[in-house]
Image (cartoon, rainbow, N blue to C red):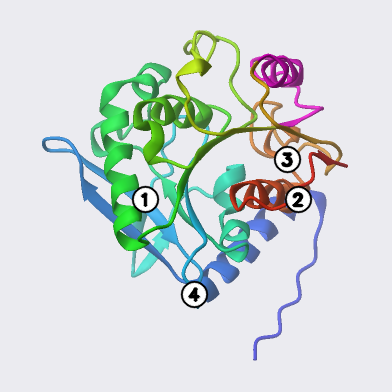
Amino acid sequence: MWSITIVITPLKTVYVMALLVWMVAIAHGEEIVTLPTRDGVTQSFLLAAPAQNKPAAAAVLFPGGNGNIRLRTENGEIKFGGGNFLVRSRLSFVDGGVAVAVMDAPSDESRGMDDRFRLGEKHAADITAVVAELKKRYPDTPVFLVGTSRGTISAAATGAALGGSVGGVVLTSTLYLAARSGPGLSNFDYGKLGVPVLLVHHVDDSCSVTPYREAQKLAESRHYPLVTVKGGLPAMSDPCEALSAHGYLGKEKEAVEAIVNWILKKPYRDNID
């Protein structure tokens, strides 16, 4: 039996979080899956699933930023960038009975995906292959698309392209407004989403392109359910990065619990404080 003592200071918190997630990942078991998708292109993802029982659902998780988590194996160990909200919280989905596929950038976008690629047909083709693989592994299991920050562009656009082949779409810390780096979802037609949609947003998200007020407006106009998150830990990153209210720092477990319960059609908290 291991005995581990960790002394936590504010500057060490993020490293401690990464260590604990890594230790739990070993216990759960994870694997890298690489699929041929388009001509000469492969798409990789990190797969984690409940160890004992068949998952009640599966979720494709789209990290924010440029979507490149550098998923790889080094000396027999799986490695990747794990700071993003959905990446570091992936095993909370698994604990709730949901298998997850954490997406990396495809092989032809190894420097990362921009908004236009996420909105385009090539990305939709890659994710179509991923969804098909999950349905092959877990027959009769609904597959959901879950994005955070810039990853919401992928979840929304591919959700529109895949239509009824997915069970629903979850948008967290959505990129509602355009920026110099791209249009985000500023011109997206949500009417193309013919499946259930859940919005999740932190009331104190101070990233300029992901304001909470836009989540409220969309929820009201489209009659989408909205999970409002409050509180958490003091920010340890830029307001648009993952270790802040934008990434539900200190409220990850509660946010994921609400998402999982919505996916599984169970009662969920729509006001987390």
Q: Say which mark, if any, is on residue 248.
A: 3
Q: Which residue is drawn at the image coordinates 64% and 18% (left, top)?
A: 222
Disc 2 designates what residue?
Answer: 254
| Figure quadrant of residue 126 | top left
Query: Residue type at mark 4?
Result: Ala
Left/right of residue 251 with respect to residue 136 in the rendered view: right
**Kind of residue at disc 2:** Glu
In primary-sequence order, the first of circles 3 and 2 is: 3
First of labels 1, 3 by sequence position:
1
- Counting from the top left corner in percent of width and height, residue 239 is at 71, 26
Would you say residue 241 sits in the magenta stretch? no
**Marks 1/2: CA–CA distance:** 25 Å
- Alpha carbon separation for disc pair 4 and 1: 18 Å
Q: Amino acid at mark 1?
A: Phe
User: Mark 2 or mark 4: which comes first in sequence?
Assistant: 4
Estimate the x, y position of residue 236 in percent, counting from the top left: 74, 39
Where in the figure is residue 171, as x and y percent of width and height?
59, 32
